[in-house]
Each structure stands twice: as C-alpha cells, then as structure tokens.
Amino acid sequence: MKRPGEPYIIINFVLAGVIILVMVYSLIFSPDRGEYPVVCIHEKITGEECVSCGLSHSFSLILRGRIDEAYRWNSYGMRIFIFFAAQLFMRIAFSRIYLRNPSIRRNLILFDTIGSSVIFLIAFMPFLVWICRFC
C-alpha cells in the first residue's frame, strides 16, 4: 500500500478543503445582510447581471434551508450546490477506497475523472452556454 502523500490523495484533500471553505463562507456571511466580500466583476464592469450573480446568496440560503428564496437569488444555485456537495462526498469516499484497495486504483481514478466531468458539465452547462454567448 502506498503512502497517503500520493498526488490523487493530495488533490482530493485540497478539493475537499476548498469545498468546505465555500460552505463555511456561505454560512458565515448572512444572506439577510448582504455583506459578501466577493463581488461580481462582470456586474461591476458592465452594470449587467451575469449567470452567476446571486450564487453566494443562494448558497447561504440553501444552507439555512430557505430553498425557495435561494431559487429567487439564482435559479442555478441548487444544481451548483448539489455538485459541490456530491464532490465533497466523492473526494472523501474515493480517497478511502483508493487507500484500501490498491488493485483498483487505476480504474477508480478513471471512473472518478469521467464521473466528475459528467456531473460538472450537467451542473455548469448554463454557465458554459452563457460564457459562449457572451464571447
């Protein structure tokens, strides 16, 4: 068995950490006060909202169980939130499987890469379409 310092484990650890930070950020900043430190650069430059405007509000509201309000802030917020939640679960589960089953590591990485790519495309398709239209 290889040590946990392998690239796949490190990448999973980093990605899980980033997702946890996004969730903590969403819990810390209140959707009721609207004091989010990250602003939409597109909106600041053009004065127009983009497809990701309201995503921070939406995440904060989802974590507080206010789903209907979350949809009003960003109609794609739930699908992005589910993507991140699924990725957090996958990073933890796949890391455990990887460490416990050395014989399937190559197939696991392939399955992880293809599966994550597919759910990324499903979750972020509206954003990708918007970027293509914008450009």
Image: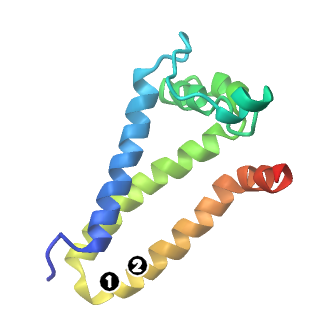
**Which x, y percent locates residue 11?**
34, 64
Horizontal side of residue 125 vs 56, given as left or right: right
Location of the N terminus (image quadrant):
bottom left
The quarter of the displayed image where residue 46 is located: top right
Residues at discs 2 and 1 in contact (Cβ within 8 Å): yes
> Which residue is at 68% across, 38% downward?
52
Callout 2 amino acid: Ile
Q: Residue furthest bottom?
A: 103
Q: Mark 1 falls on what kind of element?
A: helix
**Which x, y percent locates residue 135?**
82, 54
Q: Mark 2 falls on what kind of element?
A: helix
- Which label was assigned to residue 72? none
Horizontal side of residue 49 vs 4, given as left or right: right
Q: Is residue 60 above or below residue 108?
A: above
**Which x, y percent locates residue 119?**
59, 62
Q: Nearer the viewer, residue 127 or 46?
A: 46
| Mark count | 2
- Which label was assigned to residue 109? 2
Q: Is residue 121 above or below residue 109?
A: above
> Which residue is at 54% across, 30% downward?
62
Horizontal side of residue 3 vs 34, given as left or right: left
Q: Which residue is under mark 1?
A: 105
Callout 1 amino acid: Arg
Q: Is residue 103 above or below residue 100?
A: below
> Which residue is at 69% across, 26% downward?
73
Give the class, few, some or many, for how many residues have Cα within 10 Å of label 1's Cα (few <14, many ≥20). Answer: some
Q: Residue furthest front?
A: 45
